[in-house]
Every structure is written in structure tokens, then in C-alpha cells.
Image (tube, grey):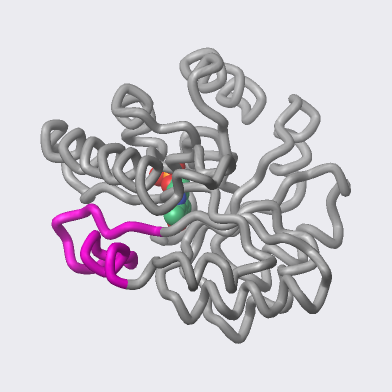
Amino acid sequence: MSIKENLQKIKNQIGDRACLVAVSKTKPNEDLIEAYDAGQRIFGENKVQELVAKYESLPKDIEWHMIGHMQSNKVKYIAPFVALIHGVDSIKLLKTINKEGVKCNRNIPCLLQMHIAEEDTKFGFSKEEIFESINEQLLADLSHVTIKGLMGMATYTDDENQIRKEFASLKSLFLELKEGIFATNKSFNEISMGMSGDFLLAIEEGSTMVRVGSSIFGARNYLK
Ligand SMILES: *Cc1c(COP(=O)(O)O)cnc(C)c1O
């Protein structure tokens, strides 16, 4: 199937239940244009350099999401235009994003990445870290960051129950924070979870934003 057909199929499966981030990492511009021409406007990349290069050469009404692990020293390259940074996994990074937001006079939307997988290879905050480190003072200091919700990745496994359990844990933490420290933050609404293999499960467990790559653009040449 073509990119356009894949996209249509996935959009039909999602309906209006979640927002679709088309993960275009490693794919050439012509593939993104094909998705763009089919109506897709939100694209996700996981490398700063590639994100900037694509931003510079593709239409300006694209919303660029940074979905990968982010190093503090690279925030400055995407701060002027990035629509959402999904993988914020340290307070240091949050503070750097805020500093760059001040410099370019922009409020930068972010998601806090939570470690929900059983594997210890994935990045993210633990629940304990979030409760320890996110407080009123920190949130007040983050004048140029909007924390829009949480992001997480499930364990890479065929065990559907395991995946469901992990997604459900992210949803329940989201609710706890939304009623707690983020109660006055009207923007705290997003749960970014679900990829090609598990986005329907993720939606059933409360995802508002799915990040789908290979099911739209085909397999990537190398594992990421
Ligand atoms: C690559 C990637 C995706 C998309 O993965 P697919 O399995 O190709 O859909 C989603 N989220 C993150 C963080 C990724 O790095």
C-alpha cells in the first residue's frame, strides 16, 4: 500500500479518539510530502539535526514534534519552532527548555516522559521522581514552558496484558497529577502513548496522541 493509503487506513482506525503524529524519522522528504499531500500536518522526528533540516525544507504549516531523547545542549536549535517536545525526562532539561523559550520569546509545549516499561532501557521519570521534583515553585519558575501532559513507551513485547497494564499505569498517573499538582493547568490534557504495534491498545487505555511511524511509511532501514 502507498503512504497515502496507509495513512487513510490508520486515520479511519483512530477516528476522532486521538491525535496522530506521523513519525517520519529516517524517511526522505518525498515521503513526508506524500503524507502532507494526503492531509497530514503533524510529524514526529527523534533527531534534532534531521528535524531542523526537514523543518527548513518542508512547508511551514507543519507541526514538528520532537519525540526522541533530547540533550540539553541541542534545545536551542528547535526552540524557535518546535510544536511539542515529547521526551522531557529531567528537570535540568525542563529548565534548559524554559531558558531557550525566554531567549526566543516563545512558550514551548512539553510532555513529561514517564518510565512505564519493565525494561530498564527506556528513558523517563519514575513516578517517585515526579512527585519529588515537580512542585509549585518549579512550575512558577517555568515561565516559558507549558507542560501539556505525559508520554510513555510500553515494553517491547507480544504480551498484550503487559502492554495494557503499562498504558493503564500512565493513564492513572496522568489523572493523579491532573487532579494534583497540575489542577490549575488547563493545558495538561495529553497522554502520548501508542506506536505502530500498539496504538489501538493505547487508545483503549486512554491515549490522546499516538506516534505512528512504520505503519505509515514502511519499515525503517535500521532499528531505532
Ligand atoms: C520511532 C518511534 C515511534 C514510532 O515507531 P513505529 O513502531 O515505527 O510506529 C514512536 N515513538 C518514538 C519515541 C519513536 O522513537
Q: Residue furthest bottom?
A: 73
Q: Quadrant of the N terminus?
A: top right
Residue at figure coordinates x 16%, y 32% from the top left: 160
- As displayed, is residue 63 above or below residue 140? above
Q: Nearer the viewer, residue 215 or 185?
A: 185
Residue 127 lies within the magenta run? yes
Q: Nearer the viewer, residue 111 or 153?
A: 111
Q: Quadrant of the C terminus?
A: bottom left
How far from the left and from the top, in percent, is residue 74? 63, 80
Q: Nearer the viewer, residue 38 or 117?
A: 117
- As displayed, is residue 62 above or below residue 27? above
How far from the left and from the top, in percent, is residue 55? 79, 58
Dominant secondary structure, magenta? loop
Question: In the image, is 69 to the left or to the right of 45?
Answer: left
Numbered-mark total: 0
Q: Nearer the viewer, residue 75 or 3?
A: 75
Q: Is residue 26 visible?
A: no
How far from the left and from the top, in percent, is residue 205? 29, 28
Residue 222 lies within the magenta run? no
Q: Give, as a single range, the part of the protein colored magenta.
A: 113-132
